[in-house]
Image (cartoon, grey):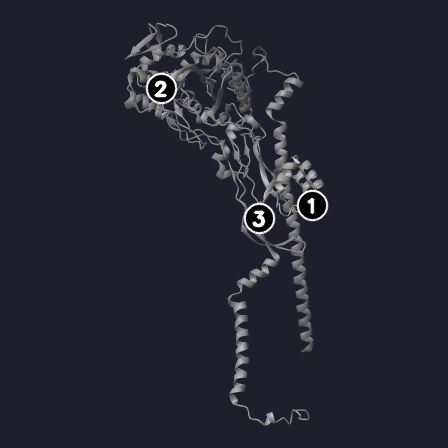
Amino acid sequence: MVRLNIILLLIAVACALAAVNANHKARKLFIELESEQKRMRDLEVEWGQLQLEQSTWAAHVRVEKIAREKLGMRPPAPGQIIAVEAEGAR
Amino acid sequence: MRGVKFSKSPLLSERLPLWRQRLVLALLLLGFVVLVGRSLFLQGINNEFLGDKGRARYERVIDISATRGRITDRHGDVLAISTPVRSIWAIPEDASLTPAQSRDLAQLLEMDVRELNRKLASERDFVYVKRQLPPELADKVSAMKLAGIHQKNEYRRYYPSGDVTAHMLGFTGIEDNGQEGVELAFNELLSGKPGSRRVIKDRRGNVVEDVESVRPPLEGKDIVLALDAKIQYLAYTHLRRAIEENKAKAGGVVVLDARTGEILALVNLPTYNPNNRGKLIGAQLRNRALTDTYEPGSTMKPFIAALALEKGKVRFDTPINTAPGKMTIGTATIHDAHMHGVLTVAQVIQKSSNVGISKMALSMKPEEMWTMFDSIGFGMPLKLGFPGEVGGRLRPAKNWRPIEQATMSYGHGISVTLMQMARAYQAFARDGDLTPISLTRMDTPPTNVKQIFSAQTAREVRAMLEMAVQPGGTAPKAQIPGYRVAGKTGTSHKLEGGAYANKYVASFTGFAPVSDPRLIVAVMVDEPSNGRHFGGDVSAPVFAQVMAGALRTLGVAPDAPLKPLATDMPPVTEEM
């Protein structure tokens, strides 16, 4: 009888410790999840800022200015354009 | 009493009355009952209060902010985006900065020390020191660890294309709510709803467990506009150049996709920079293409010709005698600038004869004209959801006098918006039908088209409009190398205080390529005052430049030989 009780007590203690351990692990994983989610949000913000930067650099005003002033480009005169029929077009 | 032991106390032998011990027992029992009752009440029946108190020690409700959706053009290029910024605020009572600290802070925030001190000396409990700072700068401020100075996360809206798309997009207020343009029209969709969740925090403030999501955040939806950023830019640059050259007061350009009714570009000048709205005046804010009406002048004529064709009053080549270049109706006289003699219906449109078109108009009933104007969308707003959108003026047909019916046929006495005019030309660019107009990109072709004219009529009017841009027409400057173009000029006097002033509105509306129309471009220039004021001189070149660039951008195959154009011939002067 005493032996059975001791065994049951040990099992109960083991279960309790396992529960504490599981809870601790869950919290650790949760903190990890939390930090990953924060990273996701930060990356999203950064992506937005990069998109903004991209559209600022690629603004047509800026592209045209560089093409005209730095690279000396200009639209072709009507006589300089040759239209080619696409392969398989009507 | 000394010497008397307790056990021998005479009091002990005294017999106490029974009620006394009963009373004590009863009082003790009652005390127990009260205690048990109270604990039952606290633990079982009314356990909310203590439970809340307990949870308040370790649970927190965190707000989750939602970002406002992006606005992109049809290719996905970002036109409006929100990024986080921080606002610095202070509790003036708590903020007692040393002079050195306030100097450093003011320098960091790029503001005047006196202004900072004035704000911190305020009587209020809460003052914004500076709003919407970049996060890096805000981090530097928080590194100073100043008492009473706090930060708050906010969002700021950026518009990378600046003044080019200003009227289309509109802008948001400091609280991130749409105030103009698409930002207002689609505010419901764009704005997210912030959520919140309940979590358990540990001693160090880390979130260790999610209890429940009180309200899941609703992120703002992204809006994909029909706008093509490149065409928009083309329209903007060419219109701006034309306005500078002609010393005009204002102007507008609308580019529509003839097949789908999508708005590919919408430009108004003068404009403003939505990223820096310091000193705005009303004239800059006006979205003229939608909120201002103008008398369209001769751009109205093709509709009358189409109606006359449709009703069987005339054919393409029916001769109409416009001699002697004027016509008297009642007490008023209509003039042509040149005497043309006998013209066919097609030539009336080509040479833009007021007398010719008036004769056609007067052969029809006012109700017939009114019904056509109404069905093509004049006189009522397009209901795009834009703030301040107007419908123009179209008076009921029963009040028309014959002279009014005649002047309306060449676009006076009736007013429209530029967007309405561009859309109405869809009836000619397509085979006589109209599609709804769309601000957003459409992935399927529109289904609910409205037939206005027969396909035959539309084809005939298309041919007349093509003649108008050829030598002998009013707008040879609207020609584009490589493409067949059709369109109509309009020049109208401006109404000022009920009388026609010596100021003009020069407009041009047209489409290309004629063999399979793809784009409709409408141009309006308000008060050109550099010597030229005809639609064919002022607006037609803008049309040609925008159309040529847009067709090339879209990769539309040329439908005409690429030879230099004959534009040396002076255009036929348009009537007014």
Badge 1: residue crowd in 10 Å (few <14, some 14–19, many ≥20)? few
Nearest to viewer (mark 2 / mark 1): 1
User: In the orientation shown, which residue stands out farthest toward the front?
Assistant: B1
- The residue indicated by pointer 3 is B63
Identity of the residue furthest to the right in this view: B100
Subunit that carries the residue with mark 2: B
Q: Quadrant of the C terminus of chain B?
A: top left
Residue type indicated by callout 2: Gly
State the separation of the CA atoms marked 2 and 1. 68 Å
Relative vertical location of residue B227 with respect to residue B541 in this rendering, above or below: below
Which numbered tag is attached to residue B413?
Answer: 2
What amino acid is labelled 1 in the image?
Lys
Q: Are marks 3 and 1 on the same chain?
A: yes
Task: Say which element carries label 3.
Answer: strand
What's under tag 3, amino acid-wise?
A: Asp
Q: Nearer the viewer, residue B231 or B573?
A: B573
Label 1 element class: loop
Within 10 Å of disc 2 (Cα), the crowding (few <14, some 14-19, many 20+) is some
**Is B383 above or below relative to B333?**
below
Using the image as rendered, state which of residue B206 and residue B333 is in the foreground: B333
Question: CA separation, marks 3 and 1?
Answer: 24 Å
Question: Which of these two is toward me, B531 or B145?
Answer: B145
Name the mark nearer the viewer: 3 or 1.
1
- In space, the residues marked 3 and 2 are separated at their CA atoms by 58 Å
Q: Which residue is mark 1?
A: B145
Question: Which quarter of the rendered picture does the N terminus of chain B lie within?
Answer: bottom right
